[in-house]
Amino acid sequence: MSRFWSDIVHRLTPYVPGEQPALAHPVKLNTNENPYPPSPRVVEAIRRELGEDGASLRKYPDPTARALRETVAKHHGLRIEQVFAGNGSDEVLAHAFQALLKHDRPIRFPDITYSFYPVYAQLYGVEYETVPLNADFAIDVDDYRAPCGGVLLPNPNAPTGRALPLAEIEVLLKANPDAPVIIDEAYVDFGAQSAMSLIDAYPNLLVVQTTSKARSLAGMRVGFAFGDPALIEALTRVKDSFNSYPLDRLAQVAAIASYEDQAWFEEGCAKVIASRERLTSQLRALGFDVVPSGANFVFTKHPALDAATLAAALKEKEFFVRHFKLPRIDQHLRISIGTPAECDALVAALTQIVG
Ligand SMILES: *Cc1c(COP(=O)(O)O)cnc(C)c1O
């Protein structure tokens, strides 16, 4: 604390990201990173951009990320005016809070969801109400019918992993024609239905995606928003009032190369999904309750063992999983899907602990 701090800084409760341990070989299953490397074309593209001497780095990157937005627009069958690119989807979401969610009425999001949402709301002075998930951690879209300043939810939800069918998203859009509805699809490629196909029909829909999870590019920081050009323009106005060059040169070429290797992407997702299903049955065999997941992680609890104790016991064996000290979920652990070898090692460690 300092007398030089602004009032807003005094009042902030910042988001706490998952630990990045300094150990040589931790089994890191706490931040939903992809266990597989990105396409080799990504590495080639970065090398090509750097050249022999890195001379391209002298120059600012394209402030509009035009080539990247064109590639991604084409990939999704959209027009470039329907695509916004930001420095990770966290930044895209932050801009959305300022550009689209600050109205007279409070916005609504689930009581159990991505814990960055309340942080942005506080930072940008956006009023919000949380809507309880039902007892199975499912979202009931009928709970989002009251007029509000906007609706925000991840699909699949985090940290539960539960996915909402596309028809339910459409119910949500129809029930809220006068408010922006933002669907955060950070994990959509691991088995949920994307709302992308509804963009042309619903001018209030903004879909947010990232290259961090399914495309193995968390270290590059590239995220997107897709929607009506008017929504995209709002985000661009905020971006150009904040940082006109949010995506660096290497990030732009890396992300383009990732979208140019569809086979690599699909294979990677299929491997993660197969490991998730296998880990789910192994955990159930050990007595764990596992929420059905459409994401690259599972949300699980053991009926007889305290979650914080379990996380600490795993950490002792250099396995890192995520535990949230939050109401309703403090007995759960969120475990990211690793390679088959990492999942097997985790199951072996849990067998020891539980046994
Ligand atoms: C990981 C995650 C993000 C942020 O992703 P970045 O693009 O790496 O900033 C956004 N929303 C949810 C729900 C996430 O889990």
Image (cartoon, grey):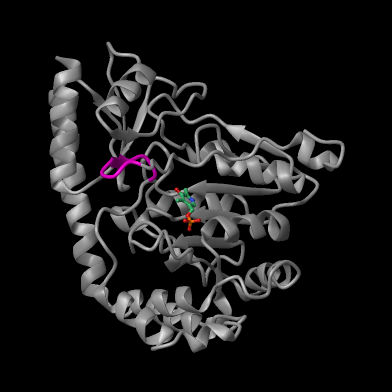
* 76 drawn magenta: no
88 over 318 or under it: above or below: below
- Residue 88 image position (x, y, % from top left): 51, 61
The span shown in magenta is 23-31
Residue extending farthest top: 304
Q: Is residue 223 left or right of residue 33?
A: right
Q: Is residue 34 left or right of residue 197?
A: left
> In the image, what residue occupies the spot 69% across and 39% down?
128
Q: Could you say which is closer to the camera, residue 232 or residue 302?
A: 302
Q: Could you say which is closer to the camera, residue 192 or residue 238?
A: 238
- Residue 168 image position (x, y, % from top left): 44, 48
Identify the image quadrant of the N terminus.
Answer: top right
Residue extending farthest right: 3
One can see residue 108 in this view: no
* 25 drawn magenta: yes
- Residue 65 image position (x, y, % from top left): 55, 80
One can see residue 33 in this view: yes
Q: Is residue 252 left or right of residue 274?
A: right
Q: Could you say which is closer to the camera, residue 324 or residue 101?
A: 324
> In the image, what residue occupies the spot 46% across and 61% down?
209
> In the image, what residue occupies the spot 40% across and 54% down?
166
State which quadrant residue 253 falls in.
Answer: bottom left
45 over 337 or under it: above or below: below
Identify the image quadrant of the C terminus.
Answer: top left
| Helix, strand or loop for the magenta stretch, by majority | loop
